[in-house]
Amino acid sequence: MFKKDFPLLGSKVIYLDSAASAQKPKAVLKAMDTFYKTSYSNVHRGTCHLANMATEAYENARYTVALFLNTKADNIVFTKGATESINLVASGYAQMLKPGDEVLICTAEHHANFVPWQQACLRSGATFKVFNILPDGRWNLDDFKAKLSQKTRLVAVAGMSNVLGVLNPVQDIVSMAHRVGAKVLVDAAQSIAHVPTDVKKLDCDFLAFSGHKLYGPTGIGVLYGTTEALASLSPYQFGGEMVDKVTIEKTTFAPVPARLEAGTPPITEAIGLAEAINYMDKIGFTTIQKREQALFEKLIAKLQHIKNIEFLGEPKYKTGLVSFNIKGIHPNDLSAILSKENVCVRVGHHCAMPLHTFLGIKASLRVSLGLYNDSKDIDAFISALNKAIGFFK
Ligand code: PLP
C-alpha cells in the first residue's frame, strides 16, 4: 500500500531490514533536493535572505521533532544519530559521576547504549551495573529492583530491543528510578518508528533516536532532554555556534540547545527528518501499528511452522522484529542464500554481544518490518527461507 512511496522498493527487493535502517519515501528525497536547490545556506550566522531561509527551515525542523515527541523546541538537540546522542549524555555524566555512584542498564542494550556507559564508569570510577532479561525476552524487573539503589545516578534503557523486539515497560522503570533520585535515558532508536513517543507521558529525562530508522536521512539524530537535564551537561564539543562570548581569557557558552550543537549542523538532514515525520503523521500511527501488527502476526505464524526454529525470546512479546536461528545452520549461510533471492535480512550479533552471550549464542538472523512491507514480502521471505533450509538438508 505504501511501497509505491519508496523508490528503492520495486517488485524485486524484499526489504526486511528496517531495524538496521529504513528506506526513504519520495517526500523526504524531494524535500532535501528542493532545499538544496532553492534555499540552501549555512544557518544562524548570516544576514542574507538565503541564510534566513535556511535558519527558518532548520528551526522549523526542530519544532516538528518537538511536536512529534510532545515537547518544546528548546528541549531538542540535533546530533548525527542515536549513538552520538547517547555519547553526548555519557560524556557529560563521565564528568559528573563519582566513585560510589552507579549506572544501571539492561543486558539487552545495543552497544550504543552499553559501551558509552561502561566507559563513563571507567573514567569516573562509578560502578557499572547490568540487569537481566527473562528467558522470554522481557525485562527481569525483579533483577532491576534488586540492582536499583540510592546510589544509582542514571538508568539507560531501550524502549524496544533491536534483537528481541520487545516493547519495554519504560514508564514503570522511570517512576522507580525517579524515586531513588536517578535520571533515565531512553534509547528510542527502535521504538520511535513503531509506537507514538510522548516524552511527557514517559517522564524520562533524556531520549535518543536516529533519523535514518524513522524513514529520514542518515547523519541526523535527536537528543531530547528536560531543561534541567540538558542544562546539567557540560558541552560535548567546542567551536562555532555554541558560544556566547569568546575572549583570550575565557569562553562563555550559549544556552541549550545551541550549547550542545557545536559547528555547522546537519541542516538538510534535519529538514529531511522533519519531512519523514510529516509523512508518518499523514499516515498516522493507528494505521502504521495496525498494519505492522497484522503483518507481524502472519510472519510469526508462518515461522512457527518451520522445523528446528529457535526464537530469541517468546514471539508473543514481540513487535515489528523477530530474531531466530535454525538449529544446525549458521545464520550467515542462510542470509547468503536469502540475498540471492533478493531478500534483505540481517545476521550477526546485531551490536548486542552481551545479550547473545547471555543467551549462549554467537549470532542470529533478524527480520524487521517497516510501514512499506506487505503480505507478499512475508510470502516471498518464507519461501526463500524454506529454499535456503532445504539447501542444507
Ligand atoms: N540503539 C538501538 C536499540 C539500535 O538498534 C541502534 C542501531 O541499530 C542504535 C542504538 C544506534 O543507532 P545509530 O547507529 O543510528 O546511531
Image (spheres, rainbow, N blue to C red):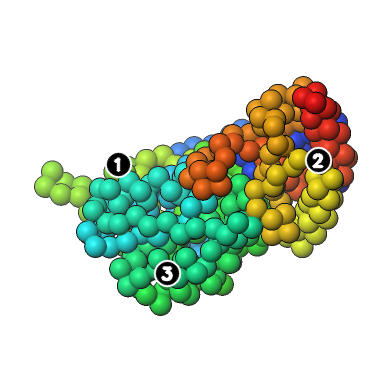
Q: Residue at x 16, y 46 (%)?
A: 247
Q: Amino acid at mark 2?
A: Lys
Q: Position of residue 320 (x, y in %)?
A: 71, 51
Residue visible at 58% across and 52% down?
Answer: 161
Q: Is residue 287 visible?
A: no
Q: Which residue is mark 2?
A: 307
Q: Are the residues tagged 3 and 2 within 8 Å (C-beta)? A: no
The residue indicated by pointer 1 is: 239
**Is residue 264 found left or right of 358 in the rendered image?**
left
Residue 7, x across and y down, in percent: 77, 33
Residue 391 occupies quadrant: top right
Q: Quadrant location of residue 248?
A: top left
Q: Residues within 10 Å of mark 2 (few under 14, many from 20)?
A: few
How packed mark 3 is, by other alpha carbons closer than 10 Å (few <14, some 14-19, many 20 or more), is few
Instruction: Indicate which disc residue 319 carries.
Output: none
Give the secondary structure at mark 2: loop
- Spatial separation of the CA atoms under disc 1 and disc 2: 58 Å
**Label at residue 146:** 3
Does 106 sit left or right of 375 as displayed?
left
Horizontal side of residue 365 vs 99, given as left or right? right
* Three-letter amino acid code of the residue under disc 3: Ala
Does 312 appear above or below 338? below
Q: Is residue 338 visible?
A: yes
Q: Is residue 333 above or below residue 77?
A: above
Q: How many marks?
A: 3
Q: Along the line of sight, which residue is nearer the eye, 171 or 326?
A: 326
The Cα atoms of the two marked residues, 3 and 1, are separated by 43 Å
Q: Quarter holding the C terminus?
A: top right
Furthest-bottom residue in this view: 179
Q: Is mark 2 within 8 Å of ligand 1?
A: no
